[in-house]
Amino acid sequence: MSDQVIYGDMKLILEDDLIKKALEAFETKEYQVASKLFQEVFIRSKKSIDCFNAVVCLIYLKKFDDAEEKFINVVKAWNDEVDNRTAPPDTDQINLASLTYNFMRYLIQFKEYNRAWKYFLDMLGVYKHLKITDSTFLYLRGIPFFIDFITAMDLLFAELTIYQKNKKLYMI
């Protein structure tokens, strides 16, 4: 049994070391290296946030098709985390809505408006389902504030091809 604990600690040390290296690579704008390191961390940890970090690197590399494919893995990993949970959620676990919102914001930041539209609609579905946009209510559920979503919507609608062509006012 003590071997398992030592192995577990060693595994965590290796993951922490890889995460540090990945973050250093990201901070020095070596996104290809960071993406590979985050992917390796994800393979070991199976945590959605580790996969999401690799997705962010792909966005910075402007590999948007790859980023969208990898985001599917983020969603799968998050669902696995929920399905395999035997205890209350970790306080540091990120909600899938937050991951989706952040992915949408990165796409908007890199002017991938048509790609961001799909994730905008996903987030819109979250808020429609909840029917409550109170900041405290959303915060307690790990969901981005509605005002932040509206700000992203304004950015998206200002540039979105569909919106520009139709010049329609979209009502939520």
Image: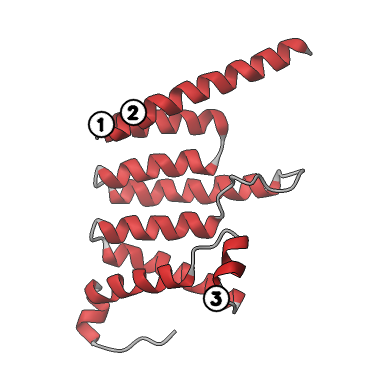
Look at 44% across and 24% down and name the residue there: 18
x then y, percent, for residue 48: 53, 43
Look at the numbered discs 1 and 3 and tell me whether their residues touch, using CB distance below 8 Å.
Answer: no
Q: Nearer the viewer, residue 38 or 73?
A: 38
- Relative to 40, is 57 on the left or the right? left
Residue designated by label 3: 133
Distance of mark 3 from mark 2, alpha carbons?
Answer: 37 Å
Residue 99 is left or right of residue 141, and the answer is left
Q: Identify the secondary structure beneath mark 2.
A: helix
For marks 3 and 2 on the same chain, the one whose residue lies earlier in the sequence: 2
Figure check: 100 above or below 128: above
Q: Is residue 52 left or right of residue 131?
A: left
Residue at 24%, 47% in the rendered image: 62
Q: Residues within 10 Å of mark 1 (few under 14, many from 20)?
A: few
**Near-viewer residue (108 or 43):** 108
The reply to whether the C-beta atoms of the residues labelled 2 and 1 are less than 8 Å apart is yes
Q: Secondary structure at mark 3?
A: loop
Residue 4 rendering spot, x and y as whole percentages: 72, 15
For label 3, the crowd category at 10 Å Cα-Cα, with few meaning under 14, some 14 to 19 and many 20 or more, is: some
First in sequence: mark 1 vs mark 3? 1
Q: CA distance from mark 1 to mark 3?
A: 38 Å
Query: Disc 2 residue type?
Result: Glu
**31, above or below 139, in the image:** above
The type of residue carrying mark 3 is Thr
Query: Residue tagged by mark 2?
Result: 24
Q: Which residue is mark 1?
A: 28
Residue 172 position within the rendered picture, expressed as x and y whole percent measured from the top left? 44, 84
